[in-house]
Structures are given as C-alpha cells and as structure tokens.
Image: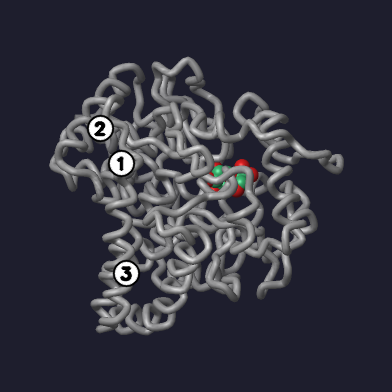
Amino acid sequence: HSEHCSEEDKRASIVRESMEVLRMNDRGGYTVPAEGLYPFQWNWDSAIVSAGWAVFDEGRAWEELETLFSGQWEDGMIASINFHQFSNTYFPGPEIWGTPDNPSKTSGITQPPVAALAARFLFENAPTPALARAKIDALFPKLLAWHRWWYKARDPENKGVVAILHPWESGMDNSPAWDETMQFPVDDLPPYERRDLTHVDANMRPTKDTYDHYLTLLYRFKKAHGYDPEQLYWISPFKVTDLCTNSILFRANRDLRWLALQLGKHEEVAEIEKWLDNGFEGFKSLWDEEAGLYKCQDQITGKLADAGISAAFLPLFAGVASKEQAAKLVKNLERWLSKVKYGVPSLDPEDPRFDQLQYWRGPVWLIINWMISNGLRHYGYDDLANRITEDSIQLTNEAGLREYFDPVTGAGCGGRQFSWTAAMCLAWLD
Ligand code: 2M8
C-alpha cells in the first residue's frame, strides 16, 4: 500500500511541476520549449503546449495558438520559429534567417501542422463553450489557410502527400531517415558558432557535418527569392515525403473537417475531404510491404528511406493504415519494444545506427509516444498502447520533464524543464 501511495504522490508532484514548468517558460502569450536552449516560440511545440495549458488555464491555452498564428505569413505558412524577443542563446537566430517581415520575424521554413489538433482539443474540452466558439470562429480561417499552403507550396504535383524541404521541418532533425537524402555537397558557408553545445552534451546533438548541411539549405533558400515557398520546392536538393509531417497533416485535416462541421462550413468540408481522399492514395506509395513498415520517401529519386523510424507508426495516429497494415506495424513495434526497457525508441533498436543518447537517432520522445499510443487504441491494440503509456509515466517519474529519454536506461537527455514533456504529463498522462 505504501508503495502505491508513493507512486501516486510522485505523480501528483510531476503534475504540479509540469504546471510550474509551463509558467516558468511563459514569455507572455507564448511558451518557449526550454530556457536557454530554445528561447523562441516553436511551431509544433506551441500547439502541443496549448493542450497542456488547457488543463489549468483556458484563456492562456487559446492565447498560445493566437500568438503562434500572429506570425502567419501572407501566403498562409506558419514558420517553424517565431522570434518575438531578442535572445543570443540560440543559433541560427533571426539575423541569420533574415526573412522578410511577414508580418513579424520568423524562420523561413515550417514544422508539422499540429495546430488544428490542438484547436479541436481546446474546443472539445472547453470549460466555457461560448469563449471556445468565438476563438474557433477567428482561428478556423487561419488554420485553413495554413493547410491550403501545404498543398499549394508543398504538393504542386498533386501527389496527395506533401514534401518537406529541410530536416528541421520534420521536427526529427537528425533522423537516420535523412542520412541518404542529406548526402548533397555542402556550400562554402560563412563561419558560424553553434549555441546548442553550450547547453547540452555534444553526444546528444547533431554533428558538425549535419549542421553544415542544415545551413547549406538555409542559405540557398534565403538566396532563392527570399524564401518564397513556391520557388523552394523546385530548387531544394532535399525534398522528402516525411511520415511525421504527413501523418500529422492527415490527422489535422480530419480535425479541421470536424471543426468545419461544427461551424457549418460545408464548402470547406468538401475541400478538406478532397485532401483526405488524395492523402489516402498518396500514403500507399510509402508502404514497404516486405518490412511491414511505412517509410519516408526521397521525392527526387523516388527511393524509400532504408531506416525504420518511430514515425513509421504514425499512420496509425492518422488513421490511414488498413487493418492488415496495422497488424504488421504492431509486429514490428513489439519486436522493437522487446529490445529496450522503455518505448518507443525513435529508431529500430536493431539498426546498426541506433544510438540511445543521440537526439532523433534512438531516444524516446513523449509527444511521439502519445501519438503512437493514441493510434494503437484506435486500431484496438489497447495492451500495447497501455505499455507505451506506462513507460511514459515511468520515464517522467524517474527522470523528470526532460526533452527526451534513453530507451535502454531511462535516463533523461537533452534540455531540462521541457515544455512539451510537461504538456504531455498534463494533457495525456494525468
Ligand atoms: C529541435 O529542433 C530545433 C530546430 O527547429 C533545434 O534543434 O535547433 C527538434 O527536436 C524540434 O522537433 C523541436 O520543435 C525543437 C524545439 O523543441 O527542437
């Protein structure tokens, strides 16, 4: 009994700590992912964090999304980073990106479109329905504009699935899924100084060669027509169908459709249904029958990436996999989980590149765990979903609100007092 009690006490204190972390990382209308390491407003972080705020401060939750959309470009894009306030603890900052004022300073690329999911979550869980309705009325056209941007700028050839043009856009920055597609030669770069290594151990962060490639893309995009997204699609040496982005976009379209129905926007419903139908077709080219996994695809060569990554399970979250595909995915997932203590590792633990500490090349990320477990439940794999939820509770109980976790030892890695981990403890694990 006493053990049970102390587990409960532990959980209650994690929940309290999670609220404190969001308050501490609040910069007035937006939340930074982590003090020092990431001192600006990140796109998909903020969308996830708004669900955390929703648990104890409804108004603040909506404000998070409103501030995110205050940086929306005229063409509809929501950039990966909004630079609301000066900071010199992160590289590359606004002076390197040098985007046109559009309407405020941002990066020049995007990130996975979680915002519509968050908007639906806030709307459905709203203590004050009238407030929620007013907020959604204002937010809906902006969400729609962003989704339209994805298809216009990132699927001009009507594949039904969208391209990312920079690994930073996937959110899984140094995933082994990009090892082959990142082989293009780097340009002569102006000298630069990374800041991430002043906050976090080098063995937990991308290598210098990887950063040289990131910056080569950044400078080419900047030179090419001031980041005009419609030009970038045609000139980028990195053009990939990413599973994380496309699964989230598919799910976000379902949530946007649901919101459109609430608002009685029938033309918009039809427009979104077309994206869903095309997406359903587009996903077929990402299925690797032999591996029993979804794979990212190089749009330049047409080749599927060889790496099995955690995003391979996200089509379950999207709801785009068939029952047969789901069964094969589950078999792979069970094999992965039998090789580690805590799931879900970001790379197949039997891949020789698996590295339990290296960022998106092995470690566990709570936001991905939430999406995978949600998807598993939808397909009726409750036991496996419970295992992932239990692992996530254990990890945060033992290592705290870290950026990511070692799947072998359970140790916390990367940044501390991390906002999206706190948000997951509030909105999912409590
Ligand atoms: C990481 O990415 C940034 C670049 O956007 C970085 O390392 O400098 C990723 O984990 C990304 O998914 C996340 O949104 C961001 C902030 O938490 O950090």
Label 3 secondary element: helix
Disc 3 versus disc 1: distance between alpha carbons? 24 Å
2 or 3: tag closer to the N-terminus: 3
Q: State the colouring used for the structure image.
A: one colour
Which residue position is annotated with label 2? 329
Where residue 404 appears, x then y in whole percent?
49, 35
2 or 1: tag closer to the N-terminus: 2
Where residue 166 appears, x then y in whole percent?
59, 46
Which residue position is annotated with label 1? 372
Label 2 secondary element: helix
Label 1 secondary element: helix
Q: Is mark 1 within 8 Å of ligand 1?
A: no
Q: Quadrant of residue 207?
A: top right
Q: Quadrant of residue 333?
A: top left
Residue 356 falls left or right of residue 342: right
Disc 2 versus disc 1: distance between alpha carbons? 11 Å
Where residue 134 appears, x then y in whole percent?
37, 84
Where residue 264 appears, x then y in whole percent?
25, 84
Disc 2 versus disc 3: distance between alpha carbons? 27 Å
332 and 423: which is toward the camera: 332
Give neighbour class at mark 2: few <14, some 14-19, many 20+ (Cα, 10 Å).
many
3 or 1: tag closer to the N-terminus: 3
Which residue position is annotated with label 3? 272
382 and 210: which is toward the camera: 210
Please say if 119 is above or below 242: below
249 and 411: which is toward the camera: 249
The amino acid marked with disc number 1 is Ile
Residue 43 falls left or right of residue 398: right
The amino acid marked with disc number 3 is Ile
